[in-house]
Amino acid sequence: AGVVSEGKTAAEALSKNTPALARLIEAVKAAGVAQGDLSTSQIALTPRMTQPSASSSPQARAPKIDGYEARTGITVIVRDLAKAGPLIDALVAAGANDMSGISFGLADEDKAKDQARDKAAEAARARAEIYAKRLGVKVGELVSIVEAEAEPPVRPMGDVRAYRMAAGAAPVRVEPGEVTVSAALRTVWRIEK
């Protein structure tokens, strides 16, 4: 979540932005988010340019600074999904006018990854047994095992834009779908007759 503020000068844009961001941080804290689950993720100050008309003289056609845009953002980790929608509503009410990028992950990714590895190992052995049986041989000892890269367990969602969430809009619903954790192995087995 973030705030975009404009001003004629860089200082004016920043001076509007700073208290607005402070209101967002207070809304996050009021929602019970732990300090360690809140971080600044963006600070940007850019000139706003205007392009004079093509009928102007070549010197007058150069872009000119027409003001500045200050953009600050925070990243919030919400550990209770039921609080995500109300938190987005609270951020918009506190003045957030720039939101994008919601993603889902696992609190204990290592445990889920280990479970996926267990299943991958079982499947590798079972497949080896199927092939060996069909070929009239037996599976011997495991010669090598390599863990293949699998997709990360975070499922990004589309942008959530604050301008779609005007005051009085219906509460924001957050639907996580499923987070998939996978593991893939390449194994080499000795064949016994």
Image: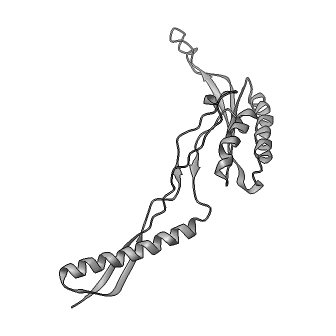
User: From the viewer's perspective, is residue 50 above or below residue 117?
Assistant: above
Question: What residue is drawn where x is 62% and y is 61%?
Answer: 107
Where is residue 10 shown, x and y percent of the image?
Answer: 74, 30
- Relative placement, left or right, of 184 versus 176 is left
Decide which of 151, 192 is in the foreground and name it.
Answer: 192
- Relative placement, left or right, of 93 versus 187 is right
Res. 95 in view: no
Query: Toward which corner of the image does residue 166 lie, by quadrant?
Result: top right
Decide which of 163, 168 is in the foreground and name it.
Answer: 168
Tell me the quadrant of the picture where the C terminus can be found: bottom left
User: From the viewer's perspective, is residue 95 above or below residue 50?
Assistant: below
Res. 116 in view: yes
Question: What residue is drawn where x is 58% and y is 21%?
Answer: 63
User: From the viewer's perspective, is residue 141 above or below residue 178?
Assistant: below
Question: What residue is drawn where x is 69% and y is 37%?
Answer: 89
Query: Toward which corner of the image does residue 56 lie, by quadrant?
Result: top right
